[in-house]
Amino acid sequence: MTKAWHEMTALELGHLIGECAIDPIDLAQYFYDRIEKADPQKRIYVRLTKERALAEAAAASERAKNGTRRSPLDGVSISWKDLFDTAGVATEAGAPLLEGRIPSEDAECLKRATRAGLVCLGKTNMPDIAFSGIGVNAWTGTGPNPHDKTVDRVPGGSSAGAALSVAQGLAAAGIGSDTAGSVRIPASWCGITGLKVTHDVISLKGVVPLSYSQDTIGPLTKDIADANALYAILSGEPAADLQGVSLQGVRILRATSQFDELTDPSIMAKFKEGLALLEAAGAEVTEGPVQAFDDVIDLSAKQGSPAAIEACMMYGERLHANPDGMYAPITQRILAAENYSAVGITALFDGMKRLEQEYLEQTAGYDLVVGPTQPQHPPEIAPLLENVDAYLAATLMSISLTRLGNLLKLCATTLPCGKLDGLPVGMMLMAPAHHEGKLLRLSAAAENVLTSMNA
């Protein structure tokens, strides 16, 4: 049976566009029709860019007909998190503090995507300036996790709408950002694929900042092949060759540090089922600690969060002048950085550089370091809006494992690894900075093996 368009990968759609079997105009309208039905409250897309999208789709349609397509994804419709500047369109990053902010030009990565022929459907929902791993936005509402039809659970954040646009078939892919896990968290909880790239590999120019030393840009997709294609377009780096990928002889370290202490035993058991499949496919799996993981968390607990420090530097004065400019618990997290000392902040950034090197020494000889992406299932939304302590606890839980990759400047993917009680479990694969090519190849090999868990 032929798949519906919203069930196809971005590359599958691109291939059919290239064969003139799908017209990009029809594809964009198809997604808009689905958005209208599925998202009437605008909890996934806060803003559509229909005029732009249909013009881009019309140009892509002509290129397909005359054989001048710009990339394998020319004409494919995708979503953009509402922190990417979009010329002439409000870009507010989920915060009343930025209400009415209309940039004059596109973010650099959006320019790259447009030059490659991708079609911009609209801007997706997110928590205030991306400072939340659960994805809740008290101002716009929060699209619920699609895997629980009984209770409204968080989708994960901060790229909440981006993940939901893909998981619910409202875009072929979504572009988000990841400062402490904001691509991987919602990808994991929504049962899709996410890629966190090395810091600064994809330009941050024209992206509303949270943390200039931690922010990264990354795709949320149906599979690794799509993530690979989008990575190449957004970064300008060559796409990884995914042909003939294999796990035979690949050395994998299952990190016990942080992961064993924080992860729910049932989720860990499901993750280990997936890891056993990787081992059966030829991977050599070792379990053991990574001291740098423990040390960087201890360092941040003692000296502060780099994201909070940098956000406070950028937004603190404006928040004092306008305390209601962001959701109160987010404002609280940002302004808490005013209590950090200059000596402590210096020690934090100096210590992170040292621990980046120690991590490389401790994991030398391994191709991948792996662990569950999320330690718990996504919590229910309602209690988090009723209790600040519950909100903050859930936020810290959501980033507890993913932030390791940001603090230590790693690149990482999350892959679906089956379900537990009907809710997705994610497997996180980590590699050193600037090893995206190897990471994507091995992630593709792992994805092939995990297919049986995700059928």
Image (tube, rainbow, N blue to C red):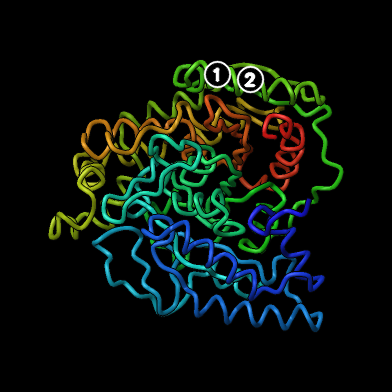
Q: Residue at image x 43%, y 56%?
A: 44
Label 2 is placed on what type of residue? Lys
Q: Residue at image x 33%, y 29%?
A: 301
Q: Of residues 192 and 298, which is closer to you in this image?
A: 192
Corner quadrant of residue 145: top left
If the image is split into quadrants, where does the C terminus sit?
Answer: top right
Residue 415 x, y percent position in the rendering: 63, 38
Q: Residue at image x 39%, y 30%?
A: 397
Q: Of residues 142 and 214, which is closer to you in this image?
A: 142
Q: Of residues 15 and 316, which is closer to you in this image?
A: 15
Residue 344 x, y percent position in the rendering: 29, 36
Using the image, determine if residue 153 lies above or below residue 158.
above
Q: Which residue is mark 1?
A: 256
In this rendering, the label closer to the viewer, 2 or 1: 2
Secondary structure at badge 2 equals helix
Q: Residue at image x 39%, y 35%?
A: 151
Residue 132 x, y percent position in the rendering: 36, 44
Q: Which residue is mark 2?
A: 272
Corner quadrant of residue 270: top right
Residue 369 x, y percent position in the rendering: 63, 29
Label 1 is placed on what type of residue? Thr
- Identify the mark nearer the N-term, 2 or 1: 1
Corner quadrant of residue 439: top right
What number is the disc on residue 379?
none
Using the image, determine if residue 225 lies above or below residue 389.
below
